[in-house]
Image (cartoon, grey):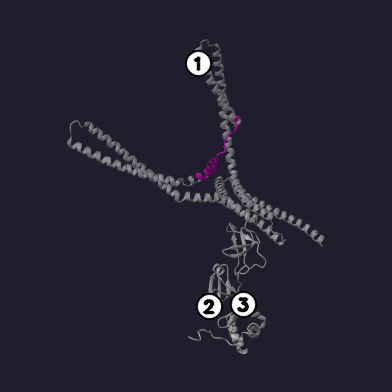
Amino acid sequence: MMTNKSSFRKPMKMNISVTCSQVFSLCFAVLFLISTSVIDYAKADRHQEAELEKQVKQQAETEKAQKAITSLTELIQNQITQKALIKKLKSELRSAREDVSKKEIEETLKQEIKKEETIEEQISTLTSGVSEQTYKTQQTKKFNLQDELQGLAEPFVKMIKSSTENARQIDELKQTISEAKRRQTIAKRAITRIEKLQTTLQKTKPQNSRNTKTHLKEELKLWSKRNKDAKTLENTSLQQLRLKEEAASSDNLENYATSFIRTRGVNLLLAILTFVGTFMLLRAVSKIVSIFFHKRGIKHSFYTRLTRLIFEALTIVVSTLTMMFVLNYLNDWILLGVAGLFTIALAWIGLNMLPVIIEQSILLLNLGAVQEGERLMIDGVPWFVKRLDHYTVLENPDLDGGHFSVPIRELVGRHSRPPADDEAWFPTKKDDWVQLENETIAKVIIQTPELVQLIELGGARITFKTTDFLDAQLRNLSTGFRIKLEFGISYKHQKQATTEIPTQLRNYIEAGISKYIGKENIRNVEVEVLRAGPSSIDYEIEADFKGKVAPKYEDLEAELSKLMIEACNTYDLEIPFPQLVIHHPTNP
């Protein structure tokens, strides 16, 4: 038999591995097809635009090449001229005899050589498109995070600036109109004052007023021109403002919305669909593998949990990279920059939450303080950890609605332990009978994780919070209970008090109780001497019953008392009154 089992298990493991590899291959093939279809859709949508851009680019390159040939011809001609000049200066330097002349020629020669080198570099750059300095210089630029982030944010800022350009121009025109009106007001006030001065001057005609008259005339001409210029500026600005507002309310808004929907709107939709599609596909792969393992009866081990955790992290990374790949292929640098900044922000948040993530990961690997298959206390209520996952499944079989899920983060800082054999999950069960601290007998009709409701024999209902019910001192009668009763007889029966009478009382009580509730519901009846009291010999009756007769608890107490009295009557046992004995001397 052992040989047969081992020979059966080996092919099963091989089948599991083969099936898993097939599932992963199929899922990644589907992922590849989705990515390919998205890219093909983008290609088809932009094919015509790409052809037009290609033609414009070829024409621009042709024009650029023609200009380069013209410039290159001019530079080569200048180089020939410069070389001839250098040759001439070298000849003059050799023939010069005075030191002063040699120094002047040397300085001039150095300058002309530098010019010739500059022309040579320009010719080389224009010919190859690469300068010698760029080719020979070693790149030693250091990485600067601030500059890189600024580079990512720059396209987004430019887009915002471009989209608000018309609004900013309208605001500037309004400010210009306001300034023009202010200038007109000042100019009119100045013109009024000058005209008033001219009128006064004409009436009074003081001596030597010729120059004053000329000055006032020039000032009036100046302020009149300023008033006219301000008026012209106001009218021009008003016309421009009217045109800008019309454009903003009709064409520009529609064009911008249409352009956004056709370009970035489509790109954003494709990126989101790619992210969601990839994420959902990989999650489906994880779910299919989990269902497959469950059907095969493969338990969650450390390695399966670790593999799943790594796969979930890769799901997020692959989904994000796929989205950014689509944006990069579509050449949408603005959305790519926004996505990059968003990803960096999420990574930064994740880095700050690293201790919490590590602790939750330890729990998910079933290595933490709370483990699967153990007993966990939450608010005083015990729970069985059925499945440890991102949303952990907890169960309590004795509670109505005792099955729910909690996020793994709520288990951080808690502890679980293996349950003991036959350990109760709650003090009571539904339909159990309990005795409260005030000796009230009630039946449990509802017990949930939040509330426990009892009903008394008369029909009154008592409701507890579950935590308060657990803290209450109560007796569960449904598992069995004992009723104790004290009873006394007279001292005149002292000789039989410890021998015959206990047996007589026990037999009589047991027979009477058996008729009342049935013998099968009685566990035991005992009658024992309790004490020698001041007025009587006291007995204690202990009757043990099964939980089935718990609703008759109070009736059983009364029945026991009645049976004791009947037993005393049957066996002629005197029930004494309390006695007070007074001793006094015989000879007072």
Closer to the observer: label 3 or label 2? 3
Nearer the N terminus, badge 1 or badge 3? Answer: 1
Q: How many neighbours does mark 3 have within 10 angstroms: few (below 14), some (14-19), or many (20 or more)?
A: some
Which amino acid type is marked by label 3? Arg
Residue 142 lies within the magenta run: yes
Which amino acid type is marked by label 1? Glu
Tell how many labels. 3
Can you say which quadrant of the picture contains the N terminus? bottom right
Q: Vertical placement of 293 versus 562: above or below?
A: above
Q: List the residue tagged with mark 2.
A: 460
Disc 2 on helix, strand or loop? Answer: loop
Confirm whether residue 431 shows in the render: no
Q: List the residue tagged with mark 3.
A: 482
Which amino acid type is marked by label 2? Ala
What span is in magenta? 136-157
Residue 396 horizontal/vertical position (percent): 62, 67
Residue 140 lies within the magenta run: yes
Q: Residue furthest top?
A: 97
The answer to which quarter of the image holds residue 128 is top right
Q: List the residue tagged with mark 1.
A: 104
